[in-house]
Amino acid sequence: MGTEKRKKSKTGDKVAGNDSTQESCEANERRNLVPEDGTSRKHLFRFKTFSGVRYIIIAIACIGMTLINGMRTNIGFTVLTILDEKAHQKLGTIKAITSLPNVDWNSKMVGFLHSSFYIGYILTHMPAGYLATYLPSYRIFAGSILLSCALNLLLPACINADEYYLTCLVRFLQGLVEGSLYPGCYGVLRYWSTPSERGRAGSTVLTGAYAGAVVGFPVAGVITHYIGWQYVFYLNGCVGILWALIWLVLAREKPSDHPFISENELKYMTKEQGYDVTDSKETKIPIKEILTCPAVLCLCLCHFARNWVFILMLTNEPYYLSLFNFTVAENGLYASIPHIMKVLTAASSGYIADYLLLDNLLTITHIRKLLTGVGFGVGCIGFFILTFVKDGSIVLIFLTLAVGFTGFAVSGWQINHYDLSARHASLLVAITSTVGNIGSVTVPLVTGYITFYHTLESWSIVFYITSSVLGVAVITFLIFGSGQQQSWSNPPDKVLLVQQLDPLEAPPYKAERLQDSIKPTS
């Protein structure tokens, strides 16, 4: 029996083989991945090429995440004007006052309205994660934002007509289409980031989710205070649709598909990424191994805790701060402060993680646990302190610390999917996000029920629960979390690795051959 060994090709793709197949592997390398139909890799006519295309893709993706998450604050701010009996005293113009929604909804109804979005959201995560392994991720990402923004334009009419159930239906539909947001996003990051830059690239894009509240709350506050709450929905919807059209023009699924990428950047990314960005022919997804992996289960719990805190703030933070008699404009500004700090910590976490990794100061596992421990640990303590703080200024300080420090976990558990398996990252995030969004559905309902009378004591109960959720998640991750690639991540040695040419083609692919099937020697 010949001794099997792994050889890494000049393109960065790992090739499994043995002595008898080495010659054919070298021949494949010399062909430089020429497709079977004989066409050149340079099938795209490039008018002008330049380096740094991956940075442009990452930046535009970050803006998209900011817009879609900023749009989620629209309903949160609008229900403030519905639930706050003194809302008309906190607006700045007659026009804004006269445009207030004339509906009679209570906190329990508002809680279900928020949850209706996440019920739809949770239903499409798993299908989207599966589709992201077959369809172009960048189109899934764009379609999610485009459709949700279009639906956002319908909400003012539904609310003005006092159509509660119709409003819930539109929010449910928004949740359905946004369920593919993160699987699509992680699919984009799979191809447009390298292992050495993944911390910074991932934290940049995911920071956009937290920047949404930084932009969304102040903009919603100012527009609602001076113009009218309806225009918040129109602005976010139109800008989001414009972003989606720009993204579809400028983005591509893979660096090799992009018409403006330079050869140097393409070679660099191909070499750095290795064969994690290739597909394997007729290989089943190891779903059983994934669902029973302790490290994946840890991520599910962390995703639940993250969503609990994030959705609590997106949907109820302005309502909580209204207890301290701020104006609507002030409420919007103050509500954004914790998220500003969260953006700063999330963005810096990528540089901290890459610095510790590239300088070999800590292992990947220790880096992920360190950042998750700091982020969730401080958040747990901060929310506990909020249970007995009564002064508005002190509340803002500890709310900023509690929410802001959770941003460090972006380069902790939240980017950990790629450590476990870059190949299956979209599916992993679909699984963990499905579990996480149980928290998204639950927290508005629980909060609406507990804070029915809107007192500081009722909010203390909410913060006790939030502190406990973060505490359980961080302890579990510190014990069972891992930064190592899992054994089920790679396909079996004796497979045909392919680079899919047609993104809509179903397997088996008519594609570039990266490796011949390996037969055991006698």
Image (spheres, rainbow, N blue to C red):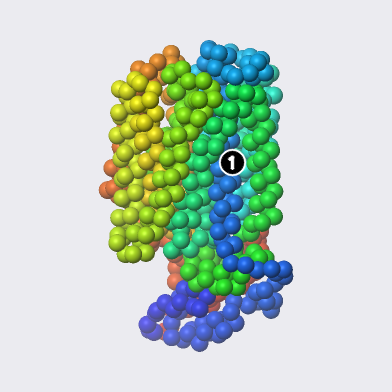
Task: State the image quarter where residue 398 is shown.
Answer: top left
Within-10-Å neighbours for mark 1: few <14, some 14–19, many 20+: many
129 sits left or right of 307 in the view = right
- The percent position of residue 60, horizontal first and vertical second, equals 59, 51
Q: Is residue 282 visible?
A: no
Query: Which residue is tagged 1?
Result: 67
Q: Quadrant of the N terminus?
A: bottom left
Q: Residue at x 34, y 46 (%)?
A: 372
Task: State the image quarter where residue 458 is shown.
Answer: top left
Q: Residue at x 62, y 23 (%)?
A: 226
* Mark 1, secondary structure of its residue: helix
Q: Is residue 260 visible?
A: yes
- The percent position of residue 315, horizontal first and vertical second, equals 50, 29
- The percent position of residue 455, horizontal first and vertical second, equals 40, 15
Task: State the image quarter where residue 48 is shown.
Answer: bottom right
Q: Quadrant of the C terminus?
A: bottom left
Camera-nearest residue between 5 and 406: 406
478 sits left or right of 181 in the view = left
Q: Residue at x 43, y 86 (%)?
A: 19
Residue 17 vs 60, above or below: the answer is: below
